[in-house]
Amino acid sequence: SAYLPNGWDEFCKLKNDSTDRIKFYLCDIKVQFSGKWNFLQLKDHIANKSVKYKFDIRCDYPANISVQWPLKAKNLLRLKAENCELEHYLRGYSNMNTSNIPDELEYIQFENCIIIVDIFDMLKIAGNISELDKDFNCGHEETVEYYIFKNNSYGFGNSVENFLSTQYNNNVSSMNADIVNKGSEMLPKARLIRHKCIYRKLLYVDLSVNHQTSKFHTELGTENSMFPELRIFNLSKTMLPNLAEAHRKWYRYFPKLEVMDLSYNLFTELEFDPSADAWGVPRLTMNMSHNNVTELKVAKLEELVNMEKLFIDFSDNPLNCTCTEETRREYGSFFLKRGDFHLLQQ
């Protein structure tokens, strides 16, 4: 097909919901086709086409595709990859010639993938993070509506061996110390980024089952980004130990958020800002089930129950239900005053 780069019709087939205006392909990357799906090749091929493109890609392990963030390509609306090794993911930082390409991607999904990062690229970005190009940092801020980055992991391929031999004469301890040092320098430098990413159409974010997510990542993301339309935010199974400010004061960062899933994490407290009720935001359903909350004082329970803008599910937390006679009376008095309450605890 002339719509695809030469040879791609071996592993990419039109889906039934394609139209004359939008070509929607399913690409089945078996091992014999590993490495043949190449983002830069696609970008050049479709740039001057009169149609738009969507791609769903699924790989047979250990097949790989070449994908370069920030995924800027004219006429590309959707990119979904499952079970793939993603090669060259950060290589786009060294080839930033995307500023003349407008944002177009509406749907981005990487799930169950191994992202192969060249350690040279990673450290180059870490050393210059405060000077990151806005296109590289923000991606498709004007157009993206759905962003799913779920159950992914990272690998360095052969780059660690090359890095160790060329930069450190195979001295592992020196290399590790230098990487730790660069990492500690990166955090304060990241706060010096001068631009903000404004995701004007983003409705849905799923970052679940990613053990690389951190409280710092959440806070930095909300310091440098705005999410005026976000409705659903999934951070389940990310091993987060503490609530970030963006969780406790969600109404300031996600003014239209309706659902936040923080289930199956390591939180020990339910700390949310009651002043949310003074803001003109929708009522948020907060899933805090399957965490490590062991104690909930009556005063805190009453505060949460009285919040009109927050509905919390904290079922299946290891609450210690033993209490003194005094606290038993406090609970009894509280529940007598309340005919119903919007906290769920099974």
Image (tube, rainbow, N blue to C red):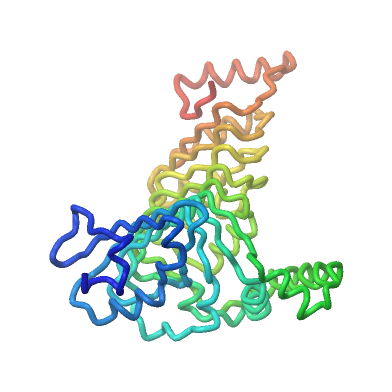
The answer to whether 294 appears left or right of 195 in the picture is right
Residue placed farthest to the front in the image?
A: 32
**The N terminus sits in image quarter:** bottom left
Q: Is residue 235 visible?
A: yes
Indicate left or right for 231 with 244 as reference.
left
Q: Residue at x 19, y 54 (%)?
A: 17
Q: Residue at point 60% right, 54% down? A: 213
Q: Is residue 186 above or below residue 301?
A: below
User: Is residue 280 visible in this depiction of the protein?
Assistant: no
Which picture quadrant has residue 97? bottom left
Q: Which one is in front, 174 or 232?
A: 174
Q: Is residue 197 above or below residue 307?
A: below
- Which percent across, then down, holds residue 8? 32, 67
Q: Residue lying furthest top in this view?
A: 325
Q: Is residue 343 left or right of residue 109?
A: right
Residue at x 50%, y 29% (from the top left corner): 343
Q: Along the line of sight, which residue is nearer the eye, 182 or 41?
A: 41
Q: Tag count in the figure?
A: 0
Residue 192 relative to residue 281: left or right: right
**Residue at the (39%, 70%) spot, across then down:** 140
Question: In front here: 37 or 89?
Answer: 37
Q: Residue 209 location, x and y as percent? A: 55, 46
Q: Is residue 100 depicted above or below 58 in this figure?
A: below
Kindly give the residue lying farthest to the left in the view shown: 20
Residue 133, image x and y in percent? 52, 81
Q: Position of residue 221 (x, y in %)?
A: 55, 63
